[in-house]
Image (cartoon, rainbow, N blue to C red):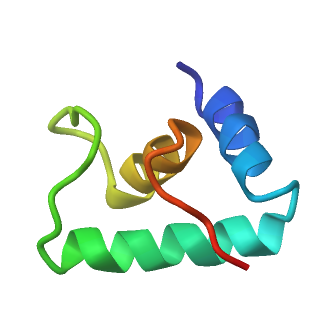
Amino acid sequence: MRLEKIASEALKYANDNRYLLSVSVARRVAQLQGGAKPLVEVAKFEKPVDIALREIAAGLIEIKP
């Protein structure tokens, strides 16, 4: 899936609030870099930001305002 499509799907879970989405992605990236296991399948080349965005787009991460 293309990154633009993933971002638009993830934005739906943030009630179309880009700021809320970016904060949620940043939190999840910090968790992933701290050793948390990804909730989606990950390819070797994927960056933590891409993983976090895909997790949110899949509805696996709850976004709280």
Camera-side residue of 65 and 17: 65
- Residue 29 is left or right of residue 43, and the answer is right
- Residue 14 is left or right of residue 35, and the answer is right
Please state the horizontal and vertical placement of residue 55, each as a whole percent of the image. 43, 46
- Residue 38 is left or right of residue 12, and the answer is left
State the residue at coordinates (70%, 36%): 9
Please state the horizontal and vertical placement of residue 44, each as a whole percent of the image. 15, 37
The quadrant in which the C terminus is found is bottom right
Residue 56 to residue 41: above or below: below
- Furthest toward the right, the residue is 16
State the residue at coordinates (22%, 36%): 42
Please state the horizontal and vertical placement of residue 3, each as a whole percent of the image. 59, 33
State the residue at coordinates (71%, 50%): 13
Q: How many marks?
A: 0
Please state the horizontal and vertical placement of residue 7, each as a whole percent of the image. 67, 42
Q: Quadrant of residue 16?
A: bottom right
Residue 9 to residue 38: above or below: above
Q: Quadrant of residue 31?
A: bottom left
- Residue 37 is left or right of residue 49, and the answer is left
State the residue at coordinates (28%, 38%): 40
